[in-house]
Amino acid sequence: MNRAVIYPGDRLRRKRRAAVKPPPGPLTTPTNEPVTMTRTNVNRTVDAAPEAVFSTVSDISNYSEAVPHLVRVEFLTEQKVGVGARFRETRVMRGREATTEIEVTEFVANERVRMVSDEGGTIWDTVFTVTPLGEGGGTRLDMVMEARPYRIMSRLMVPLIKSVVAKAIAADMDAVKAYCEGGGDSGSRPA
């Protein structure tokens, strides 16, 4: 199994390295203060093959087709799938567009993909895990998003917006489920 990992503690705006060892001890901010973390877990049972579900969540081109409020994707690297792929996604949240730069830092085909962004003084670390549910039983899709704020304002804001983020994640997962179960056509985009 070919595995490549870039640990999310490494700031994305620094020069990328092929592999980064995790920092010893607890994760800290640039000023050596401990980082408080918020974790959101969402899962869905999808009546589709694990390969189809994984392709939808690991390839931003497919994901943007599945999630209707993702309005634009701009690739920042030649590589579009797998470790090292970087892109900017623009989505509509609460009536306003928000753009985020994301990097794929871990990719195990048909099993899991990790995407990390550094926005607004917070490291957003998202892991999608795909698990087959047996012969013809569909797929379990788990998503875990950790938010690790490292600026004072972010430390105040992240706990306040956790419920909004959880609702947005649930909506994304519902859209992915509908897309995969509909054979790759969510039917939620205007013609």
Image: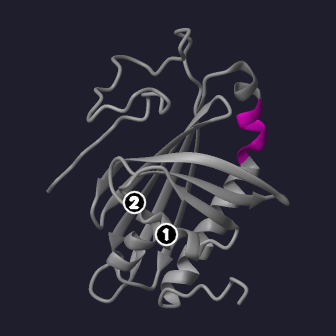
Residue displayed at 27% across by 63% down: 109
State the residue lying farthest toward the front.
78
Q: Which residue carries the number 1 mark?
A: 61
Tag 2 secondary structure: loop
Residue 148: x and y, percent?
57, 32
Question: Label for residue 142?
Answer: none
Q: Is the magenta stretch mostly helix, strand or loop?
A: helix
Q: Give the range drawn in magenta.
A: 157-162
Label ID, residue 80: 2
Q: Where is residue 174 in the image (x, y as percent from the top left)?
A: 61, 74
Above-or-below relation of 149 to 137: above
14 in magenta = no
- What's under tag 2, amino acid-wise? Lys
CA gap, disc 1 to disc 2? 8 Å
**Which residue is at a point 60% across and 85% down the rendered structure image?**
186
Q: Which picture quadrant has residue 162?
A: top right
Q: Residue reaching furthest top?
A: 31
Q: Which residue lies furthest to the right in this view?
A: 95
Q: Does the magenta stretch include residue 159?
A: yes
Residue 64 falls left or right of residue 27: right
User: Amino acid under label 1?
Assistant: Ser
Expressed as whole percent of the image width and height from the top left, the position of residue 87 reads 51, 52
Q: Which residue lies at the image location 55% right of the left edge and 57% below the top edge?
A: 74
* Circles 1 and 2: CB atoms closer than 8 Å: yes
**Sequence-earlier tag: 1 or 2:** 1
